[in-house]
Amino acid sequence: MQKAILLICLLGIINPVKGAEKHTKTAFENAVKKLALKDVQAQMTLETTDTGGSSILRKLNVSFGCFEKARKVMIEITAPEDLKGTQILTTHFTDKSRKDIIEVFLPSTKKIRKFRANNRNLKIPGTEIPMSHFSSTAFDDYLISEEEKDNFNGREVQKIKLQLPGNAEYLVIYLDVQAELLYRINSFDNKDNLTSNTEFTDYRHPEFYTSENHFPYKVHVYNPTSGKTSELTITKLSQLTQIRDYDFELAKNLQP
């Protein structure tokens, strides 16, 4: 994936994987579970800067809903004006026989486009943030192997490699095994070239959660090919007091 849970990646359930020591594997699975948001809405800012220093600021409302048959994430762009009303919906079905999907509604066309959720090249329009950051299946099917230890902002981290069977592209993840937190995800192509660097910082514990969940309130993505960077910041996180299927449907945008 270009990967990083955007945050979001922020919502995964990890399938059993092979090749890593049990302790590291468990810490990785728990780190991803700590990122799992449900029945909350996040207000975010997303600033993208090009190589010339010019930047564009977008504002997003992102809702996370957990239903009986599916887990959904709805992203609505509220600014700037030319993208206002754009909505992106990711759906992860609890029934494994059903394929997860990503749907995008563009006000300019009044149409909904659908993609496979495992399309790892999809990004939030005009940014470097991969849609997989908001997918609950972001790390499914990856094989894990341990790399060397390293340092991230003064913390000792374990580097682990994630690779899909038969795929030469891979990810290197920086994991704090003791705290069970993810700090960095680097994506590489089949020639070992870095294609994306994502860092998760400013972890917090929302006061309305009784669990030990922590969330990175900042996600920074750098694309060395384009030279662009995107900085996603959660400005507000609140509980959704009413969860309705209707609020997580794009078809309502097509109604007269």
Image (tube, rainbow, N blue to C red):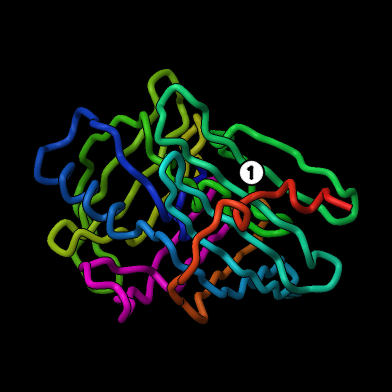
Q: Residue 25: within the magenta?
A: no
Magenta residues, dominant SS class:
strand
Q: Position of residue 121 (x, y in %)?
A: 61, 40
| Residue farthest toward the top in the current orientation of the protein | 166
Residue 184 is drawn in which quadrant? bottom left
Give the magenta part as a residue range: 195-222
Residue type of the residue flagged with mark 1: Leu
Q: Residue at x 48, y 55 (%)?
A: 197
Identify the element where label 1 is drawn.
Answer: loop
Q: Position of residue 90 (x, y in %)?
A: 57, 46
Q: Position of residue 237 (x, y in %)?
A: 46, 76
Nearest to the observer: residue 161 or residue 141: 141
Q: Residue 213: within the magenta?
A: yes
Pointer 1 residue = 122
Q: Residue at x 52, y 28 (%)?
A: 99
Nearest to the observer: residue 135 or residue 232: 135
